[in-house]
Amino acid sequence: MVKSAPDARAAVAAAVKAYRHDADIAKLLATLDTVCAQTPSTAELIAAVEPHRELHEVAGPVYERVVEREPDNAQALVALANAYWLTGRGPDVVGEIAGRALAADPTNRAAWHLWALTESSPRGRMSRWQQVTQRFPDDKLAHAALADNATSVASAENDPVALKLAIGTYEMLMATAVEAREREALANALTTLRGWKS
């Protein structure tokens, strides 16, 4: 049995520190590959990369290995899809991974968000966000994305149904908003949209 690396977390942290100093991507990738090979525990590997998830050049390669080991790990699939999205891998690749995450865990909200984001058609994206809000009625971020996408469709296509959906969604967000800045932004959006209606 392959022995676990002495400390995968420390090894990844050291690799990130060196990368921030010398910006040597090839060295970073080689080091991460070694850490992955020497760390048989997937949980340990995930814990090692977690503090560096915002660095897609770190998260992507590690989560590729995690997903190779556990192809039905929805959280790992979402992390990989997110890293790919940040590197500009495109909606087809990211959408396919998000779809795999949804198949593995239909309750994974982040997978639903990525699935909605990767739709290239504005009307299709609006429809997807509507599905997300129906599945997660308390998800304010999904409601905001739905309202924004409905506004885009209403504007681009002069669609009264999309306009009504945008206004209704913004009104619902306004009813639960507590921060003054958020309420002001929502009020401005509603004033603009109601002006279109008249």
Image: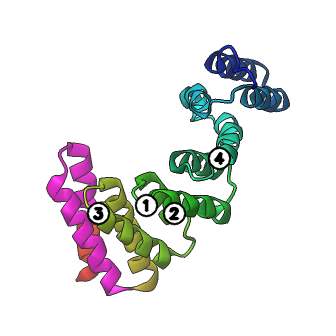
Residue 189 - label:
3
Q: Nearer the viewer, residue 30 or 39?
A: 39
N-terminal of the pair, mark 3 or mark 4, is 4
Q: Residues within 10 Å of mark 2 (few under 14, many from 20)?
A: some
Q: Is there CB contact under 8 Å for labels 1 and 2? A: yes
Quadrant, the N terminus: top right
Colour option used: rainbow
Please report the residue visible at 30 percent of the width from the left and 68 percent of the height from the top. 134
> Measured along the vertical axis of the image, is residue 16 above or below residue 178?
above
Q: Position of residue 37 (x, y in %)?
A: 76, 30
The spot of residue 96 in percent (x, y) is 62, 64
Q: Residue at x 39, y 85 (%)?
A: 158
Q: Is residue 173 magenta?
A: yes
Assess whether residue 72 is covered by the magenta stretch: no
Relative side of 23 to 195, left or right = right
Three-letter amino acid code at the position of disc 4: Val
Identify the residue at horizontal 65%, vertical 47% (top origin): 67
- In the picture shown, does residue 49 fall above or below 183? above
Residue identified by numbered label 1: 106
In the foreground, 15 or 148? 15
Residue under pointer 4: 67
Q: Residues within 10 Å of mark 1 (few under 14, many from 20)?
A: some
Q: CA distance from mark 1 to mark 3?
A: 32 Å
- Identify the mark nearer the N-term, 1 or 4: 4
Q: Amino acid at mark 2?
A: Ala
